[in-house]
Image (spheres, rainbow, N blue to C red):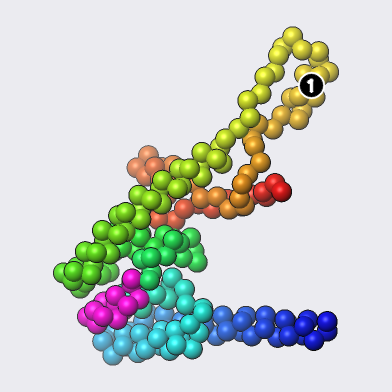
Amino acid sequence: MKFYLTLTLILIAFFANGQDNYSTLTQKALETMWKSKDEAGYEKALEMYETAFRMYPDSIDGTGLYKSSVIAAELKDYNKAFKYLIPLAKMTTDEDGIPGWSYIIGESAESEYKNLLADPRWTVLKQNAIKNKEKFYKELHKIEDEFFKAKIYSLDEAMDGRILYEKIKNYNPYLPKNQQNYSITFKVNDFCTNFLSYPFTLQLQSSE
């Protein structure tokens, strides 16, 4: 028993260390990109991202794929740009809850990937992104309906005062939830009715 416990702790420490090292490498790559003043700087940043991907393939995240695809697109290395952009676009959501399709049809997509727009692969990605967006919101509305579903309560004024008081005190119209995490749309302001690219996640305790 002690052996298995020790082995488990070692594995946990190993994977945690791997994530830390991946994060350290990609953070350095990002800083290199920010400081870049020429093509050589971007090439170095991309090489650093690729080193992190090779060393820690299980830690690759949406942010890393996004940054490396943008750098490759800027360098006009089209094959590498699509190598990282395609799996990014296929993500349901990345580690920050951002849907993959938003990287393709979001507000800044065409400026960030301007060098890719003439490539037929971009057209395919865009078509798939539009379909994925529609599917995403259909599923989102289903989740919203379940989230807001409530019991129908009847509070009769003619009811005995004590019983009526107990009903009001224990009033809880919301039904038990089927899941812990919910993404729901909400109005941000008069000009933006949905938080399109960054779904709001509300933590709830589900009933079991």
- Establish if 144 lies above or below 35: above
Q: Amino acid at mark 1?
A: Tyr
Report the quarter where the N terminus lies: bottom right
Query: What residue occupies the far left of the structure in this picture?
Result: 118
What percent of the width, then of the height, locates residue 186? 46, 43
Residue 9 sits in which quadrant? bottom right
What percent of the width, then of the height, locates residue 74? 25, 78
Q: Which residues are magenta?
A: 71-86
75 in the magenta segment: yes
Query: What residue occupies the far top of the structure in this picture?
Result: 158
7 in the magenta segment: no
Q: Residue at x 43, y 72 (%)?
A: 63
Residue 103 sits in which quadrant? bottom left
Between residue 114 and residue 30, name the one nearer to us: 114
Look at the magenta stretch and give its main secondary structure: helix
Between residue 3 and residue 172, name the one nearer to us: 3
- Establish if 115 lies above or below 178: below
Crowding at dot 1, Cα within 10 Å, few <14 / some 14-19 / many 20+, comes out as few
Q: Residue at x 77, y 19 (%)?
A: 164
Between residue 143 and residue 46, name the one nearer to us: 143
Q: Residue at x 49, y 89 (%)?
A: 55
Q: Look at the numbered disc 1 and give the secondary structure of its residue.
A: helix
Residue 109 sits in which quadrant? bottom left
Q: Is residue 186 visible?
A: no
Badge 1 is on which residue? 165
What percent of the width, then of the height, locates residue 67? 37, 75
What percent of the width, then of the height, locates residue 35? 36, 83
Q: Is residue 26 visible?
A: yes
- Establish if 26 lies above or below 155: below
